[in-house]
Amino acid sequence: MHSVALAENKATQKWTVKAQEMGSPVLPGFNADPNIAVFGDTYYIYATTDGIAGWGSTTFSAWSSKDLVTWKNEGVILDLGPDVSLADSRAWAPTIAEKNGKYYFYFCTDTNIGAAVADSPTGPFTDSGAPWSPRPPGRDR
């Protein structure tokens, strides 16, 4: 706890400030870059795992809900190591779209944008095999 005093018009006001660590009000654990989508009567949250040194996350996970209150962990839907050919680390910023019954999962990884496709919003997703948006020539990062 810290006390903060502020002099205002020669009068002093004092507040006590307490820092408290807060987690997500919806999902357990550390998750970053959440993206929410709705398909049919179900809401989905897609996120990366956070709390890994050097932004080294390799997985994307999904949660589903019918009511935006109770969430079911659908597990890892894409893992850069075994599931993606263009990179092995730095899974970031997922999003998803549906067209003609196919689900297109877009994600950032390393210095590329990747894409994967599935028949279900929870996968299994198949990597496109190439960067959707490759890094510019001569650029390392």
Image (spheres, rainbow, N blue to C red):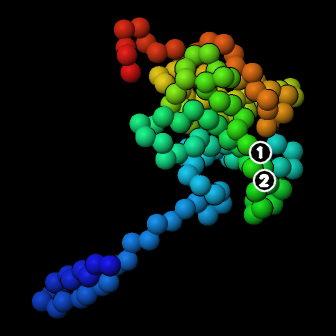
**Residue designated by label 2:** 72
* Position above or below: 28 against 97: below
Residue drawn 52% across the image and 27% down it: 89
- Label 2 sits on a secondary structure element that is strand
Answer whether labels 2 and 1 touch (C-beta < 8 Å). Answer: yes
> For the residue marked with disc 1, what is the amino acid?
Glu
Mark 2 Cα shell of 10 Å, populated few (<14), some (14-19), many (≥20)? some
Mark 1 Cα shell of 10 Å, populated few (<14), some (14-19), many (≥20)? some
Q: Please tell me the numbered disc located at residue 123.
A: none
Give the percent coordinates (x, y) of residue 85.
62, 16
From the image, which quarter does the C terminus lie in?
A: top left
From the image, which quarter does the N terminus lie in?
A: bottom left
Q: Which of the 4 quarters of the picture holds residue 69?
A: bottom right
**Residue designated by label 1:** 74
> For the residue marked with disc 2, what is the amino acid?
Lys
- Furthest toward the top, the residue is 137
- Cα gap from disc 2 to disc 1, whole angstroms: 6 Å
Give the percent coordinates (x, y) of residue 127.
70, 19
- Furthest toward the left, the residue is 10
Give the percent coordinates (x, y) of residue 71.
76, 57
Q: How many marks?
A: 2
Residue drawn 50% across the image and 31% down it: 90
* Position above or below: 71 against 13: above
Residue drawn 73% across the image and 43% down it: 75
Left or right of 132? Residue 118 is: right
| Residue in the foreground of this view, choosing between 22 and 52 | 52
